[in-house]
Image (cartoon, rainbow, N blue to C red):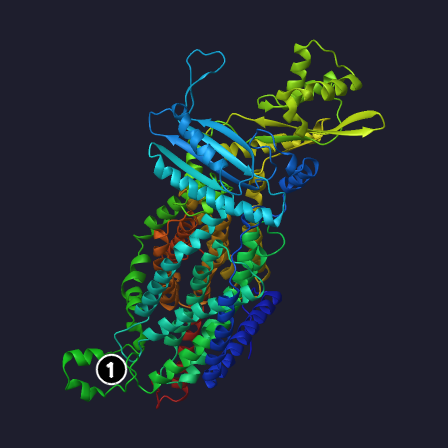
Amino acid sequence: MCFLRRPGASAGWIWWRMLRQVIHRGLQSFFYKLGLFVSRHPVFFLTVPAVLTIIFGFSLLNRFQPDTDLESLVAPSHSLAKIERSLASSLFSLDQSKSQLYSDLHTPGRYGRVILLSKPGGNILHQADVILQIHRAVLEMKDGRSSFIGHQLGGVMEVPNSKDQRVKSARAIQITYYLQTYGSVTQDLIGEKWESEFCKLMHKMQLDHQDLQLYSLASFSLWKDFHQTSLLARGKILVSLMLILLTATLSSSMKDCLRSKPFLGLLGVLTICISSVTAAGIFFITDGKYNSTLLGIPFFAMGHGTKGVFELLSGWRRTRENLPFKDRVADAYSDVMVSYTMTSSLYFIAFGMGASPFTNIEAVKVFCQNMCVSILLNYFYIFSFFGSCLVFAGQLEQNRYHSIFCCKIPSAEYLDRKPVWFQTMMNDGHQHTSHHETNPYQHHFIQHFLREHYNEWITNIYVKPFVVILYLIYASFSFMGCLQINDGANIINLLASESPSVSYALIQQKYFSNYSPVIGFYIYEPLEYWNGTVQEDLKTLSQGFNTVSWIEQYYQYLRVGNISATNKSDFISILQSSFLKKPEFQHFKNDIIFSKAGDENNIIASRLYLVARTSENTQREAVELLEKLRPLSLIQSIKFIVFNPTFVFMDHYGLSVTMPVLISGFGILLVLILTFFLVIHPLGNFWLILSVTSIELGVLGLMTLWNVDMDCISILCLIYTLNFAIDHCAPLLYTFVLATEHTRTQCIKNSLQEHGTAILQNVSSFLIGLVPLLFVPSNLTFTLFKCLLLAGSCTLLHCFVILPVFLTFFPPSKKHHKKKKRAKRKEREEIECIEIQENPDHVTAV
């Protein structure tokens, strides 16, 4: 082997080129040998995956266990809010929170809530008897341990010109019942039973009081409605599987009964199914717990796995028919498995980065771990199980057996004497082989459409300007959407859409969004409360809030009684001996922690409550309040923390949920850059990076415009989009940059003809399989449907519209290939002339 040096080419460039060729040919040789090995032992490679599926499938049935801790799944694992909760819990234990304020608790615990809504135009205050009747029924429930009751009014109308803001009417009232469990397992079971009975009672009360609308919620309702998505989606996922099977079978069929491969399309989808079952079994054997976010794994695995299946089918069609079937299988492996190995590796890297300790959302981490196992098993099952199926199908084709009925195909003379319907069923394409077309597989309907119609149309010079305009519109909308990204800290995005939790949340948002959640303000260090400067600092911190505070009540008590307490001893003495003895102020004892050192008492910690006026977007404004109050605790002389149970879900959620896709994207980008000079052509990686970036930003922007928030489901879909784009763009781009035709237009035509069929088969199967998700009444599956639909559509748009046009404008140039061919033709002509001159009596026609 010799390498000719181009004029101007450096020695380093030639060395890199030689290295790339050696690596590529080495990989092709390895997979050729692997294909030969599989084709010589098909029974073994068919049996081993089937046995693994049976073994791990039984473990799936025996060890299935749902994850019941919703907070640990979707809340940031490491957040300042959890540290603040621990500090608040250590200062003010749960059994001390018995005051009238319904949000005193620093943890939700066990509770039951109900919103009573009057009919339009009605006044809930006129139905006090019904409210009290429902209230008494709740308190009389067996095993109920009521801690305190909080009331709120919603849809309030005030008396006009009222100075003291007297209430004229209200549309709704909210009542909360907290249970005291103290962390005891027995009491927690009793509390769970009480909540179940509470929901049943509210349903019964709704039937008895038709003039009111009751919306109930318990602490287990969120998890129950989160898990409900899996129950609702089971039937739809089976329908989705049937649609994918049907699409794969039809798209793998041809009129040619010998070369048609419908069963291979069917078996390819089943290969991915059994590999997913095996991955699920491994997940549960390793003590994994199921949650509804894992519903996306079958679709993610199917989108990648079927791409390998259809590429192997296309690789088989590109092999020479006169070769033995074992050699054809080896050639298909050599042609396809190099690129499929690269894309599978990038899948593993992306989801492996998502499963790393840098990921702060447990649901995302569990999903990525499971996805890594699925990718590895997909890869193994495709080259083993599906490869064995390809061997058997190739053997049937070589022996001229019917691809569906598995019977011997009769000769052409015999078929000519039979009816038309029989000739149609048994047609093996012998009519076509006599023509100038030497490859009978070109008559596959997708390949025929691309070659005869689509390739000519998309490369037409009059179509290209419209494609450029289309891409500019696409980029504009994508950029506009990327500027409007919203974080998805709202847990409602993951629940069944018609569940009680969602109904309750919508009513609460409508009628009780005028105020923020009650925020606990915890002062955790001794403070000179009697000092005028400290009092002014506390007023400054609580400015703009409605406060429920023992400090304000105590200062007012001193002013009304004209009592002086300007020093420590007087302040604490009057507080303990007089103020806290009053019946109306006794509940403040739970908000102050005293310590005694000798004869001297000290206040070592205290708490008060802040409530802010908000607009309809209560959650976003609560996050803004948290972000404003926390920095003040670092610069103020007063050491405090602020906390509400909802902060656990909101705290830095945007950063926590976007980190996995940033890490995965960085990992893939780093791998592509590091292999920039190791792949067949560096421009292939360059174009791949541009294409993937364009698709990723397009999906991100368009899903934002489609009202999809950045929650754990959409982030997982964005990680998948990175790999899905690489899976489909990489073979197309590498075939283009390596093509040796005279023009870029001819190169892109050949690339589409070679890989377009597999891309169109896979994306169409993927998108059709998503349709049943649209009919699952769940916000989680609807988000999954939107994101995956955009991922498939944007990838299809780039592969068949944008790249075929843009690649005809930009590098790599194909002129040097044209010069090479001209030089070779000129060299042949010179050789012919020399032969003629040496032997003028004998001219050889070439």
Of the 4 image quadrants, the one containing the N terminus is bottom right
Determine which residue is flagged by label 1.
430
Give the residue furthest to the right: 598
- Measuring from the top left, give residue 22's x and y in whole percent: 57, 74
The reply, left or right, for residue 775 in relation to residue 183 is left
Give 531 or 372, whichever is nearer the viewer.
531
Of the 4 image quadrants, the one containing the C terminus is bottom left
- The part of the image, by quadrant, that contains residue 243 is bottom left
- Measuring from the top left, give residue 512's x and y in whole percent: 46, 30
Residue displayed at 32% across by 62% down: 455
Give 438 or 561, whichever is nearer the viewer.
561
Q: Is residue 733 visible?
A: no
Identify which amino acid the numbered label 1 is placed on: His
The reply, left or right, for residue 101 in relation to residue 275 is right
Q: Is residue 399 positioned above or below 622 on the image?
A: below
Q: Is disc 1 placed on a helix, strand or loop?
A: helix
Residue displayed at 75% across by 25% down: 527
Q: Is residue 46 visible?
A: yes
Give 652 or 135, whichever is nearer the viewer.
135
- Measuring from the top left, give residue 432's x and y in whole percent: 24, 78
Residue displayed at 43% across by 44% down: 200
Give the residue furthest to the bottom: 841
The reply, left or right, for residue 86 in relation to residue 460 is right
Give the residue furthest to the top: 562
Give 782 or 700, whichever is nearer the viewer.
782
Circle 1 Cα neighbour tier, 10 Å, few/some/many (<14 / 14–19 / ≥20): few
Residue displayed at 47% across by 33% down: 136
Total numbered labels placed on residues in the image: 1
